[in-house]
Amino acid sequence: MVTGWPIYLDASWSPPLFGWLKINFDGSVHPNNQSGLGCTIRNHNDELIVAKGVSIHSWSVNMTEIRSALCALTAAKDLMSDTLGLILEGDSAFACSTLNRVLSGVYDGDVEAKLARLMKDYPRLSISAISRRANSAADFVANKACVSDFVWERGMPLDHTFAFILSQDFHLL
């Protein structure tokens, strides 16, 4: 057994514990280096709090995934006053392993240093790798962000495909 790599826990999305928020993140890199960072933040009732997509230029899948986690943690910063903790999930084993290393205090480079400073704001932070299927909403957001930046907040009208994904991914078996 290889140690140090995250274990893929769920085949479908599951809500966090009461009072916690779950953040799913994903990155998408297209052949023209047009890339997207995507995250969804949901509560224990499976309610979407925020979905955010940011368009960037990148050729590195691993760096795009890590930058997506940074974007996700930044998006959650204003939501922490009523939150017991955060669960951060992504479908990249490399990114989740890197994030856990940064959380333990070992980091290298500007992006990882920014992550380390931001993680100090979250005293209860759990990071885990999940299956691509369980991360379908964040994947949709990341792909849509390859075209342009956007934010969907609670109560705003959602893209119909995204709304369908949200309605289905908690019920997948």
Image (cartoon, helix red, strand yellow):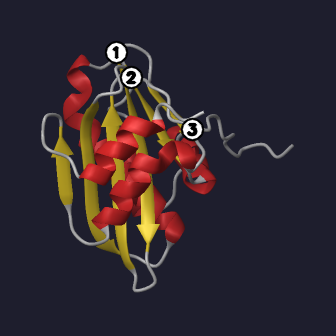
What whole-number distance in Å separates the C-alpha atoms at marks 3 and 2? Answer: 14 Å
Who is closer to the viewer here, 12 or 44? 12
Amino acid on which the number 1 mark rests in the picture: Gly
Residue under label 3: 128
Residue 97 is left or right of residue 76, and the answer is right
Residue at 29% of width from left, 64% of height from top? Answer: 145
- Circle 2 Cα neighbour tier, 10 Å, few/some/many (<14 / 14–19 / ≥20): some
Residue under label 1: 19
The N terminus lies in which quarter of the figure?
top right
- Measuring from the top left, give residue 129's x and y in whole percent: 59, 43
Query: Dot 2: what SS?
Result: strand
Residue at 27% of width from left, 46% of height from top? Answer: 51
**For residue 6, which quarter of the picture?**
top right
The numbered mark, 1 or 2, whose residue comes first in the sequence reads: 1
Identify the disc placed on residue 85.
2
Q: Does the residue at mark 1 contact the one at mark 2 (Cβ under 8 Å)?
A: yes
Up the image or down, 57 lies above or below 65; here it is below
Residue at 52% of width from left, 52% of height from top? Answer: 107
Task: Answer whether residue 155 is visible to the viewer in this image.
Answer: yes
